[in-house]
Amino acid sequence: MPTLRPSKNGRWRALVLIGVHALVAVHVAHWMSKGTTLSPLEPSEAMEFSKRDLVNAGFVFFGLTILSTLLLGRWFCGWACHLVALQDASLWLLKRLGIRPKPLRSRLLAFVPAIAALYMFAYPLAYRVWHGLELGPPRVALTRADFWATFPPWPVALATFVVCGFATVYFLGAKGFCNYACPYGAIFGLVDRFAPGRIRVTDACEGCGHCTATCSSNVIVHEEVRQFGMVVDPACMKCLDCVSVCPKEALYFGFGKAAGARAKQKGQRSRPGVSWGEEGLLAALFLAAFFVYRGLYGVVPFLFALGIAGVLAFLFAGLVRMLRRRDASLLGRSLRKGGRPTRTGVVFALAAGALLVLSAHSAVIQYHAYRSAAAFDELRDRREAFLDDPQQALAGEERARAERGLASARLVRSLGLLPTPGNELELVWLALFTGAPQDFEDGVRALASGTSEFASMRFDLARFLAARGRDRDAASELEAALAVSPSAAGYDRLARLHFEAGRADEALAVFERALGTFPDNADLVYNRGVALGMLGRKDEAAAAFRRVLELDPGRVDARENLEGLGDGTPLPPRR
């Protein structure tokens, strides 16, 4: 039998994938230099269509790749996906270290990519239909300025590469993330069934198995071409490695009949796997790990959580096997022999135990973060009343719910390994709801001074202070808020606050400052005119109302006030 030779296509595919990443770098550089560019050419961007009827460049790109897959088969994963490139690089490195990862053969986890695809692309649309939300018409926005808004920060991206690349390959097999996590692969795999382009075979094939040995997608190529005359497994990424290593040159990529229903017969082939008991254990561990890590601390995105869940499910299942069996192994290494743990088993048990403790801690954080958020969401509509009425108070079950939420928010703050976005916000509001106004005041100031994201909360604090007769403190908070986020409404509120407190000169000074920034804001001009009229400065008030009518000729209140001043000057005509 001839020796298995290395794939000739590996280098070509590596060069293509490097080129893809170079294009990504050019795309990012264009955004950084111009401030706006095409929206990210990522399949995940197509979710915006299901959520908001938005057609962006990512949606167009994903649609074109699906259409091309309908002709060529599942080529995109093998020749253009950055995560496949990462997994291939990890596999190459592991092989250089003498490690050949074995694929996990799980029947239940194989459904994860399809479920993830439905959640990402079908669920948002179904949710809108179910709740009677308006659909369409589609809006087109192919460019955007906030290019990086949908991407995680670089530490999370780096961790994603480590887990979804190296770890999934080492523990789950060469294409571990593709097989047990990737939602896009599920869509490409479905479309692949109807594609005429696929790996086919001639009569020269002798069934040597070189094609199967070199396939990094875990496809049993020699059996499929023998049984069907082509590769029908939708996991095939058309990388052509099998074609290049065939010693008889019996394999080729060509067009003909699609796989269609024949792909469903793949279950007849011999595929080693785990028992149904272990399948159930893997599925349960996967679900638990996914819900524990999904959105943890606001930094674990959906796909990263899927990768974490797959790796942890494999490791924890191995730990259970080690604890239950007299002889147990994992990845070809003995963990327990004759009822006694091996040295490798001890190291593995300690590492898996540490991950289990971390996961349990994360589960506690997630539970209390959820309980805090739920309590805040149920009381969200009460915020206005609590800001404006010092006598507002909760009673009965509402108060008990707020107190439980506050206790959870405090626990998340004290035990969390990282800050949890939203938790501090929930904490300050729940403090107000449970009758701790000073905690609310201190908390808002801490939030507003810590990051610009919460600077607008100073407007709420100003309302809170004004309602309690602390108008000077309220004015200070408004000044601080306006220094970060100038707005016509904010200036108007500050001017009104001064005027109602008897500080007319300060109020007019604020109006002047505001109009220097927003000279054509009709509301500011109108309210300045009202203030001037109340001070008896009729000529200035009349001039202000005339300016309002220039800006907004249909404004009735300005016309009525101008008529009431009765200075005898003809009014501007109505429009």
Image (cartoon, rainbow, N blue to C red):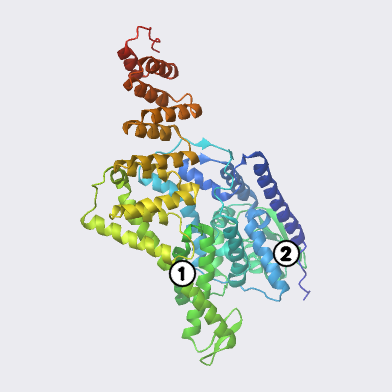
Image-based side of 159 in relation to 360, left or right: right
State whether residue 324 appears in this view. Answer: yes
Between 572 and 496, the one lying in front of the other is 496
- Relative to 547, 113 lies left or right: right
Q: In which quarter of the image is the C terminus?
A: top left
Quadrant in which residue 246 is drawn: bottom right
Residue under label 2, please give it: 203
- Gap in angstroms between the C-alphas marked 2 and 1: 42 Å
Whichever of callouts 2 and 1 sits on the residue coming sooner in the sequence is: 2
Q: Nearer the viewer's eye, disc 2 or disc 1?
A: 1
Number of residues whose C-alpha sits closer than 10 Å to that of mark 2, classed few (under 14), some (14–19) or many (20 or more): few
Q: Name the foreground residue: 21 vs 14.
A: 21
Q: Please say if the residues under marks 2 and 1 sit with CB atoms less than 8 Å apart.
A: no
Name the image quarter holding the N terminus.
bottom right
* Kind of residue at badge 1: Ala
Q: Is residue 207 visible?
A: no
Residue 404: where, in percent of width, then height? Answer: 30, 61
The single residue placed furthest to the left in the displayed view is 396
Q: Name the residue under label 1.
A: 283
Q: In this view, does 26 lie to the left or right of 336?
A: right
Is residue 280 shown above or below 184?
below
On the picture, is 243 further left or further right than 144?
right
Mark 1: which secondary structure? helix
Rendering quarter of residue 266: bottom right
Place of residue 272 in the rendered image (x, y in percent of width and height, measured from the top left): 56, 75
Kind of residue sitting beneath label 2: Asp
